[in-house]
Amino acid sequence: MRFNNKVAVVTGAAQGIGAAIAKRLYTEGAVVVLLDMSEDKLKAVAGEIDRTGEKAFAHICNVADKDQVNQVFGEIEAKFGKIDILINNAGITRDAMLHKMEEEQWDAVIDVNLKGIFNCCKAVVPGMRDRKYGKIVNLASVSAFGNIGQTNYGASKGGVIGFTKCLAKEIARNNCTVNCIAPSYVNTEMLQAVPENVMQKFLAAIPMNRLGEPEELAAVAAFLSSDDSSFVTGECIVVSGGSYM
C-alpha cells in the first residue's frame, strides 16, 4: 500500500488512462479525487472505484479555466489538508493538416493540453513546496516527436515535456519530483473509433504488435507517484511497445 495517507488528484479521469490511474492509486491506498468535464462518466468511474464513497471523489473541472482550477483545488486542500500527488492527464485532440487547421482547433488543444497543466501545477506547487513533498506526473505523447495531422497536439505535448523538465529543476530542492509519460497507441475509447485499415498501420509500427493498455500506463504512473521513484525527476518515460527505441 504505497499510497496510504496520500491524497491524489487525477485530471481527465472520466475514462481511459485517467480512470485506470485513479483506480491504481486507490487500490494502493490513496484517497483519489477525479476531475473531468463529463459529470455522468466521472461519477460512474468514482463509484466503480470506491462504492463506499469514502476515498474516491468526483469534481467537475475545466483545467483550461484558471479560476475554476483554483476554486476546485482550493476545495480539495480545504477538505483533505494537502495534495500529495497530481496526475495531469486531461487532454483533447482536434486533428487536421496545418493548411486546413482553424485557429480555434489550435487554441483549444493548447489551452487544455498545455495551459491546463500550467494551471493545475500552479495550484498545487506552493503547498508541495511548503510541505517539502510532492509528486507530479504529466501525460505527454509520442506525437511530440512528430505525427501527421497533429501540429497542435504535437506542439502541446512537446510543451509538456519541456514544462516537466523545467519545473522538475525548480522544485527538486523541495523534495518534489516532476516526470512525464509519453505513450504511443493505447487501447482507449478514442482509439477504438479509428478505422481498421488505419489501426493495422498503427500495429505494424509497434514491435510488440499490439496496443498498450490503460493499466500498463497506470503502472508507470504509480511508480512515478510513489517513493520508489524518489531519485527520479525531470524524466520523460516513453511507453510505446518498442516503437521509439
Image (cartoon, rainbow, N blue to C red):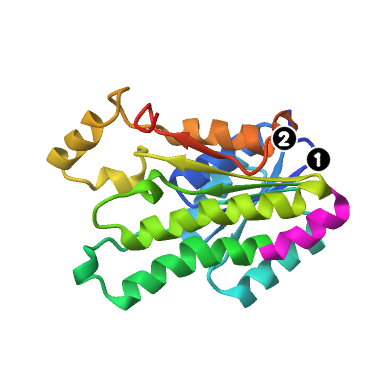
Report the side of 65 relative to 93 (left or right).
right
Query: What amino acid is labelled 1 in the image?
Result: Asn
Q: Which residue is more in the foreground, 81 or 156?
A: 156
Q: Residue at x 81, y 40 (%)?
A: 5
What SS does tag 1 mark? loop
Q: Nearer the viewer, residue 73 or 158?
A: 158
Residue at the left extreme, as displayed: 197
Q: Quadrant of residue 110?
A: bottom left
Q: Earlier in the sequence, mark 2 or mark 1?
A: 1
Q: Which residue is mark 2?
A: 29
- Region in magenta: 122-132
Q: Residue 168 got which mark?
A: none
Mark 1 burial class by Cα count in 10 Å: few <14, some 14-19, many 20+: few
Residue 184 location (% of width, % of height): 37, 39
Q: Nearer the viewer, residue 231 or 69?
A: 231
Residue 109 forms part of the magenta stretch: no
Q: Are marks 2 and 1 in contact (CB under 8 Å)?
A: yes
Q: Residue furthest right?
A: 131
Q: Up-down: is 150 above or below 52?
A: below
Type of amino acid under label 2: Gly
What residue would you read off at disc 1? 5
Q: At 82% from the left edge and 55% from the top edge, which residue is drawn?
A: 129
Q: Image check: 192 left or right of 130?
A: left
| Depth order, front residue of 168/22 | 168
Measured along the vertical axis of the image, is residue 77 above or below residue 50? below
Q: Residue drawn at (39%, 33%), measured in percent from left and top?
A: 240
Q: How many marks?
A: 2
